[in-house]
Image (spheres, rainbow, N blue to C red):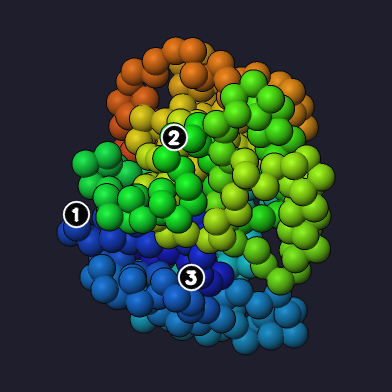
Amino acid sequence: MRIVQIIPELNEGGVERGVVELSRELVVRGHQSLVISAGGRLAGTIEADGGRHVPLDVASKNPLTAFKRIRALRQVLKELRPDLIHARSRVPAWLAVLANRSLKIPFVTTVHGFNSVSPYSRVMTYGDRVICVSSAIKEYVQKHYAVPDDRLVIIPRGVDLQAFDPDNLDRAFMEAFSREQGLEGRLVVSAVGRVTQLKDYETFIRAIGLIRDRQPAVLGLIVGGVREDKRDYFAGLQTLVTELDLADHLRFTGSRTEVAEIYALSRVVVSSSKKPESFGRSAAEALALGVPVVATGHGGILDIVLEAKTGFLFNTGDAPGLADKILATLDRSWPGLRDFVATHFSLGQMVDKTLVVYRETAGRLSSEGREKR
């Protein structure tokens, strides 16, 4: 099959990583993978993995240039002649819907997040099949857009089990990072993700302070970069660390690419997000390395963190509850975490399920003609 994925840009982010990983796996399985985007640092990876990146402005929200960009996309699609178009975001989805009116190429969308409910967001339900990355996303789509169940399919994002394999870790980095951060002999609790208000790192920091009173060896790691517009928020977190006298119990490591190694150095991984996450990739990645997860009990994380089986859940903003659940993970063993991810959230199963959707959609529409809504 010749598949086109269309996404605004190819820079850092979970959706972008998913596009790159799927492109690579499509090529490995003998398919032609093409990705249309405005570019970014991951565009070269698409090419290096055997796919093709087609640069086109499918990111701009400027309505004055929309018709020009729709015409350009229609021409590109005519030249590429794909078997199927897969849109991953709202702007490129609108452009694809309008460019594809006369071409009638089978069309699939993926709803990656809890987008605002609006006519603008409704475009993500216009796919001949609509992929949802979690049960929570499927429920959200059905509640607000009344999409028939037979057009919806749940396909969780996939974890690359080779990249998150205890046997494939960079031991030299782990030793150096452990020395740099002073991890030896510490109870390491990590939270991974960019420093933003939505991650609710205040609650994480307060929980570390409460644990310190019972487990003086505790050391919390916040692993994520700080954008320029989040500098004030970051400064507030640093002030909170000072106020709680946690300078020896909390580290801001900045953005790191070696997240698998950091998970493996941790006894517990925490996701304290205020806003429900559509999936919870960091939780699945940590479980793949055999590390239990404590997370806020909402959103897509509910598919991943099963109470007392793969970790524990706590209420949003409840620092004492988070502290108790972190300590509770220490009182038991956690067998089967990697097997759980391999069964439900592996990259392989994601690709398998996605190809089934592609084949069914392309095959049905090529024989019956495009369905009308």
Q: Earlier in the sequence, mark 3 or mark 2?
A: 3
The disc at residue 185 is: 2
Look at the picture and state if 107 lies above or below 261.
Answer: below
Q: Amino acid at mark 1?
A: Arg
Could you tell whether 130 is left or right of 50 in the image? Answer: right
| Crowd around label 1: few <14 · some 14–19 · many ≥20 (10 Å) | few
Give the x, y percent position of residue 102. 51, 71
Q: CA distance from mark 1 to mark 3?
A: 22 Å
Q: CA distance from mark 1 to mark 2?
A: 45 Å
- Residue carrying label 3: 10
Give the x, y percent position of residue 182. 48, 47
Q: Quadrant of residue 272?
A: top right
Q: Nearer the viewer, mark 3 or mark 2?
A: 2
Q: CA distance from mark 3 to mark 2?
A: 40 Å
Q: Residue at x 77, y 48 (%)?
A: 242
Pointer 1 with pointer 2, Cβ within 8 A:
no
| Crowd around label 2: few <14 · some 14–19 · many ≥20 (10 Å) | few
Give the x, y percent position of residue 69. 59, 82
Q: Secondary structure at mark 1?
A: loop
Q: Earlier in the sequence, mark 1 or mark 2?
A: 1
Look at the picture and state if 277 lies above or below 181.
Answer: above
The disc at residue 29 is: 1
Q: Amino acid at mark 2?
A: Gly
Q: Residue at x 46, y 22 (%)?
A: 310
Q: Residue at x 40, y 79 (%)?
A: 54
Q: Secondary structure at mark 2?
A: loop
Q: Residue at x 33, y 71 (%)?
A: 45
Q: Secondary structure at mark 3?
A: loop
Q: Amino acid at mark 3?
A: Leu
